[in-house]
Image (cartoon, rainbow, N blue to C red):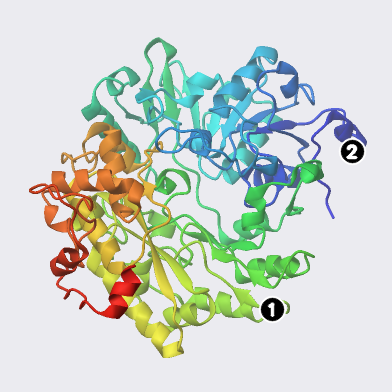
């Protein structure tokens, strides 16, 4: 089996190398598994004959930490890791998280905020002229001027702050090979301006063919309307078939220029990427520290697709993976599954088969493969497009093959199904097999909210569609004799959500009869349509004004309303009900969210008796009997 790529100079020399072609710095621990971007890019370069050394989580306080291999022959590759570092480090209320799942033993503090900037600056202090190429989701979503929630301002392109030469945005397989070949041919890094899926800086527009000129950084950083207009232009240029070159002016710093996205991988290319010789393990140097928690979560999961035509406004996939769906072949997935069954730790359970959306297995329509996605229309929102291909046949076939593998007891689906896509499917087969074979008591679904006003700003289907799905789900369970539940994910404080809409969601939670253990407060991450709304108060595509719950106290109220049963939330819930004019929900009735003050009555100052409470609830007081008297004593 192929060994891990070298992480020390000694390991490099043991391979007989005197120099590496690329040094890959990553904010994650080194895990050689295709769920980690660093593993895919480094193994892909290795397959093309390039020598790659890995520096995982270098100490950003010491220049020596980036000098492990010396100067690479072709360049440095820098990524913050699988997650945006700021989301990895901070909750939505800007509090420090306690665990980093991508670090050994879950230890926090092994990477800085914004590693793409910090690592690149550290490299540039020592290696003045060696090319630096940024990649990964952190750089991808910050490739142009963007609103930064943590600093509450518009920051310029990460390319300028980092001092790097180039950004490979999106998933990066096509662009990194083209960049490597260009560097190998002797082309200077400042002349590599032609690769799709890259962003470069230039003093003028001489290298950009017919570019869309975006509002300047100076303009978007001071004018929210201009920022919304710029974002809308970027949003319309995320498709590899129709996107144009875009240029952003930075005054005397010149221009940051974005080339159109790289073409999606063909099925054969995607198979080739996942067939590379991964060790499917963390590097042994982490054994003594308990390994890497993130791997334990996905080690026995299978990636079957990329991209998502769901188009939720709070999701960054449109800007990163794109809306065109890409899939692996059944043979490729089955080979990985068979290898998985031979792992000593495999207990017979495949934890997931999916991707951003589990049940997408083909592009939403065939025209996307040659003409791209529609610029001004969504595939599923506000209702499914008439050209949408709704078909679960291929996915059902794949799941059946996986269930038949020797050593496999159960195949779960945990990355989430798109319930409106299921409702749109005229065939009941997928839903029947889902409840029969792929759910363990609870199915996680993401309606996100119950207010159609909020769902409109989320880019999600109406609440009625979710109710249709629940009806079908219950019938499918009844037909198989199972009692399984749908566990919904809800989000508070999304743009467009007023206190009245939050109360409406609380009433729905009340009627469900359960309290969500976790509440997802809307998190304004870079390069999402919802984040643009949050910052500007404008829907960038429709130009309509949007109500934004920005005040931390109001956000706390909205979150508390979803967990109204928690005694610690009582005062916030009461305040929210007063604000919404819904004091009818304070009382002893079955529809009430909270009780009145139990220990006093305003008029008389005396305590409320149990008989009075039961009367308010419409129940008769208990008769005074000897048994009741003794019970009371």
Rendering quarter of residue 274: bottom right
* Nearer-the-camera pick, 502 or 65: 502
Q: Position of residue 400 (x, y in %)?
A: 58, 80
**In the image, residue 46 above or below residue 359:** above
Q: Position of residue 317 (x, y in %)?
A: 43, 48
Q: Residue at x 65, y 22 (%)?
A: 60
Residue 15 got which mark? 2
Q: Secondary structure at mark 1?
A: loop
Q: Residue at x 51, y 75 (%)?
A: 394
Neighbor class of circle 1 (other Cα within 10 Å; few <14, some 14-19, many 20+) is some
Residue 76 got which mark? none
Q: Position of residue 175 (x, y in %)?
A: 57, 40
**In the image, residue 142 above or below residue 623:** above
Would residue 185 be visible to someone looking at this image? no
Q: Residue at x 7, y 48 (%)?
A: 603
Q: Which residue is mark 1?
A: 405
Would residue 578 be visible to someone looking at this image? yes
The C terminus - image quarter: bottom left
Q: Residue at x 14, y 50 (%)?
A: 601
The N terminus - image quarter: bottom right
Q: Left of 194 or right of it: where is 12? A: right
Q: Left of 56 or right of it: where is 473? A: left
Q: Secondary structure at mark 2?
A: loop
Farthest residue to the left: give it: 603
Q: Left of 407 or right of it: where is 421? A: left
* Nearer-the-camera pick, 22 or 570: 570
Q: Position of residue 572 (x, y in %)?
A: 26, 43
Residue depth check, mark 1 versus mark 2: number of the one nearer the observer: 1
**Lower position in the chain sequence, tag 1 or tag 2:** 2
């Amino acid at each position: 089996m192929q060994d891990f790529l070298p992480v020390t100079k000694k390991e490099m020399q043991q391979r007989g190398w005197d120099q590496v072609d690329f040094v890959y710095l990553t904010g994650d621990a080194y895990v050689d598994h295709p769920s980690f971007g660093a593993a895919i890019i480094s193994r892909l370069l290795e397959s093309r004959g390039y020598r790659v050394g890995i520096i995982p989580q270098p100490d950003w306080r010491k220049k020596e930490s980036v000098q492990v291999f010396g100067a690479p022959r072709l360049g440095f590759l820098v990524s913050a890791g699988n997650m945006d570092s700021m989301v990895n480090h901070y909750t939505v209320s800007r509090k420090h998280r306690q665990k980093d799942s991508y670090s050994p033993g879950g230890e926090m503090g092994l990477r800085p905020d914004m590693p793409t900037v910090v690592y690149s600056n550290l490299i540039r202090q020592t290696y003045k002229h060696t090319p630096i190429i940024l990649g990964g989701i952190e750089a991808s979503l910050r490739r142009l001027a963007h609103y930064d929630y943590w600093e509450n301002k518009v920051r310029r392109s990460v390319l300028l702050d980092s001092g790097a030469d180039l950004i490979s945005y999106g998933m990066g397989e096509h662009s990194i090979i083209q960049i490597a070949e260009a560097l190998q041919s002797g082309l200077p890094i400042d002349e590599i301006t032609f690769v799709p899926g890259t962003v470069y800086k230039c003093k003028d527009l001489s290298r950009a063919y017919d570019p869309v000129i975006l509002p300047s950084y100076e303009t978007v950083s001071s004018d929210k309307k201009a920022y919304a207009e710029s974002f809308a232009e970027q949003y319309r240029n995320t498709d590899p078939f129709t996107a144009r070159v875009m240029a952003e002016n930075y005054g005397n710093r010149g221009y940051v220029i974005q080339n159109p996205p790289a073409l999606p991988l063909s099925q054969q290319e995607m198979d080739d990427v996942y067939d590379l010789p991964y060790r499917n393990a963390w590097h042994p140097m982490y054994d003594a520290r308990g390994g890497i928690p993130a791997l334990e979560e996905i080690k026995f999961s299978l990636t079957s697709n990329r991209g998502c035509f769901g188009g939720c406004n709070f999701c960054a996939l449109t800007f990163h993976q794109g809306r065109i769906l890409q899939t692996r072949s059944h043979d490729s997935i089955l080979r990985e599954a068979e290898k998985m069954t031979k792992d000593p730790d495999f207990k017979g359970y495949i934890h997931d088969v999916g991707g951003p959306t589990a049940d997408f297995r083909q592009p939403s329509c065939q025209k996307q493969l040659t003409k791209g996605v529609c610029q001004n229309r969504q595939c599923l929102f506000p209702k499914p497009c008439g050209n949408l291909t709704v078909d679960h046949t291929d996915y059902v076939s794949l799941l059946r093959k996986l269930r038949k593998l020797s050593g496999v007891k159960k195949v779960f689906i945990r990355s989430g199904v798109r319930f409106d896509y299921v409702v749109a499917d005229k065939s009941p087969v997928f839903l029947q097999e889902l409840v029969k074979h792929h759910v363990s008591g609870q199915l996680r679904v993401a309606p996100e909210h119950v207010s159609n006003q909020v769902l409109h700003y989320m880019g999600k289907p109406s609440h009625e569609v979710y109710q249709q799905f629940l009806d079908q789900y219950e019938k499918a369970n009844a037909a198989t004799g199972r009692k399984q539940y749908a566990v919904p994910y809800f989000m508070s404080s999304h743009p467009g959500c007023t206190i009245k809409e939050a109360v409406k969601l609380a009433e729905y939670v009340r009627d469900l009869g359960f309290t969500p253990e976790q509440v997802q407060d809307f998190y304004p991450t870079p390069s999402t349509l919802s984040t643009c709304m949050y910052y500007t108060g404008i829907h960038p595509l429709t130009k309509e004004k949007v109500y934004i719950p920005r005040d931390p106290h109001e956000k706390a109220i909205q979150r508390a309303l979803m967990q109204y049963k928690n005694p610690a939330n009582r005062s916030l819930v009461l305040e929210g009900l007063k604000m919404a004019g819904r004091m009818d929900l304070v009382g002893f009735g079955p529809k009430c969210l909270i009780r009145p003050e139990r220990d006093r009555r305003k008029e008389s100052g005396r305590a409320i008796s149990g008989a009075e409470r039961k009367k308010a609830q419409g129940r008769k007081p208990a008769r005074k009997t000897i048994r009741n008297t003794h019970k009371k004593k």
